[in-house]
Image (cartoon, rainbow, N blue to C red):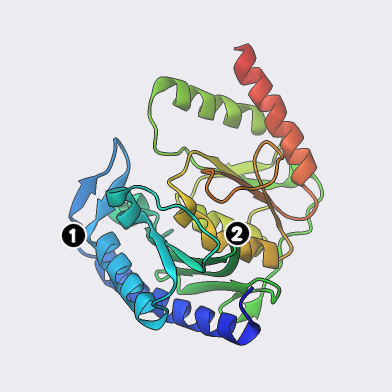
């Protein structure tokens, strides 16, 4: 584990990189976008690439001995393996589809793992100017003010967030909508805002009680958000209820009270999918 003074330095440099990238996003948000397709619905823009270059150059310059995993580099070169070395895991623009449409749920996500454990997290939405930060063991903050996950204990009064994911084959879409159909009878309502990182921050600051997503892009979507949720007193787990694996492309997060109830509801939803 890195000592406290170096963690504070890591956080400060990540915040600076996120704010600089945020400036690029803010400028690009109101301009015409040049869009490429990575898959059927997965988009990448010049802004994604410019932000990743900026963030990696900044952090590599400051911490040349650290490792790096990023969405656009990994898309080009295959996902990097996560080792015990300090590793920056970066999504330069989470919510690219939102960005392309001018829907303001977009952010920069910069996480640092040490010994494979999410240790520093920065998520910055430059459109709302909201900066979420956390260091493992030292709490979570929104624009410098401490945040806590919600205290809701009843599933039926909970706000649930999820995402459709990027696959559009019939079996995936059917499973997704059937799951949602089942869960809608168990919770107050559902939100799909289009950013995995901001959904996690929503759990951390109590705007959302529960979030789950199956089949998102990779560890860059969650590396920062995981530590922010945990430091806000929330729980991060695999949707099956098992321990969480940052490389698994499956995630669930809740406040401290709803995990078991939500896992039961999700299991019931899965059982219905397999019966149909």
Of the numbered discs 1 and 2, the one sitting upstream in the chain is 1
Neighbours of disc 1 within 10 Å: few (<14), some (14-19), many (20+): few
Distance CA(mark 1)–CA(mark 2): 33 Å
Horizontal arrangement in the rendering, residue 246 relative to residue 253 (left or right): left
Q: Nearer the viewer, residue 215 or 113?
A: 113
Tell which residue pokes out farthest to the bottom in this image.
Answer: 5
Q: Provide residue 173's location: percent of width, then percent of height.
A: 45, 26
Q: Residue at x 46, y 26 (%)?
A: 172
Q: Secondary structure at mark 2?
A: helix
Is residue 213 positioned above or below 169 on the image?
below
In the rendered view, does 194 fall on the left or right side of 61? Answer: right
Quarter holding the N terminus?
bottom right
- Give the percent coordinates (x, y) of residue 26: 32, 71
Identify residue for label 2: 226
Q: Position of residue 93 (x, y in %)?
A: 37, 60
161, above or below 54, in the image = above
Residue 107 visible in the displayed image? no
Q: Residue at x 60, y 19 (%)?
A: 273
- The percent position of residue 178, horizontal first and vertical second, equals 57, 24
Q: Disc 1 vs disc 2: which is toward the camera? A: 2
Give residue 32's mark: 1
Q: Which quarter of the rendered picture does the C terminus lie within?
A: top right
Disc 1 vs disc 2: Cβ atoms closer than 8 Å? no
Disc 2 packing (10 Å; few <14; some 14–19; many ≥20)? many
Looking at the image, the residue that sits furthest to the top is: 276
Query: Residue, x 69% and y 77% (percent of image)?
Result: 138
The answer to whether 245 appears left or right of 163 in the picture is right
Q: Is residue 183 above or below residue 34?
A: above
Q: Residue at x 41, y 74 (%)?
A: 18
């Amino acid at each position: 584990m890195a000592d406290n003074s170096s963690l504070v330095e890591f956080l400060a440099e990540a915040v600076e990189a996120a704010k600089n990238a945020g400036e690029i996003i803010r400028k690009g948000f109101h301009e015409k976008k040049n869009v490429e397709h990575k898959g059927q619905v997965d988009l990448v823009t010049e802004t994604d690439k410019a932000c990743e270059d900026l963030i990696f150059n900044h952090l590599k310059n400051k911490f040349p001995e650290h490792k790096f995993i990023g969405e656009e580099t990994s898309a080009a070169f295959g996902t990097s393996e996560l080792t015990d070395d300090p590793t920056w895991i970066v999504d330069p623009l989470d919510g690219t589809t939102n960005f392309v449409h001018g829907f303001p749920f977009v952010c920069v996500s910069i996480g640092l793992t040490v010994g494979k454990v999410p240790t520093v997290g920065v998520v910055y939405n430059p459109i709302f100017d909201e900066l979420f930060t956390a260091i493992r063991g030292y709490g979570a903050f929104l624009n410098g003010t401490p945040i806590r996950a919600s205290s809701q204990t009843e599933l039926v009064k909970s706000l649930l967030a999820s995402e459709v994911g990027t696959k559009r084959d019939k079996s995936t879409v059917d499973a997704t909508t059937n799951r949602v159909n089942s869960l809608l009878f168990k919770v107050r309502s559902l939100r799909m805002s289009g950013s995995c990182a901001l959904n996690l921050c929503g759990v951390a600051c109590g705007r959302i009680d529960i979030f789950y997503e199956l089949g998102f892009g990779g560890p860059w979507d969650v590396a920062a958000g995981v530590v922010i949720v945990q430091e806000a007193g929330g729980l991060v787990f695999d949707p099956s209820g098992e321990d969480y694996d940052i490389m698994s492309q499956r995630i669930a997060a809740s406040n401290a009270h709803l995990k078991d109830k939500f896992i039961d509801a999700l299991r019931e939803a899965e059982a219905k999918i397999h019966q149909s």
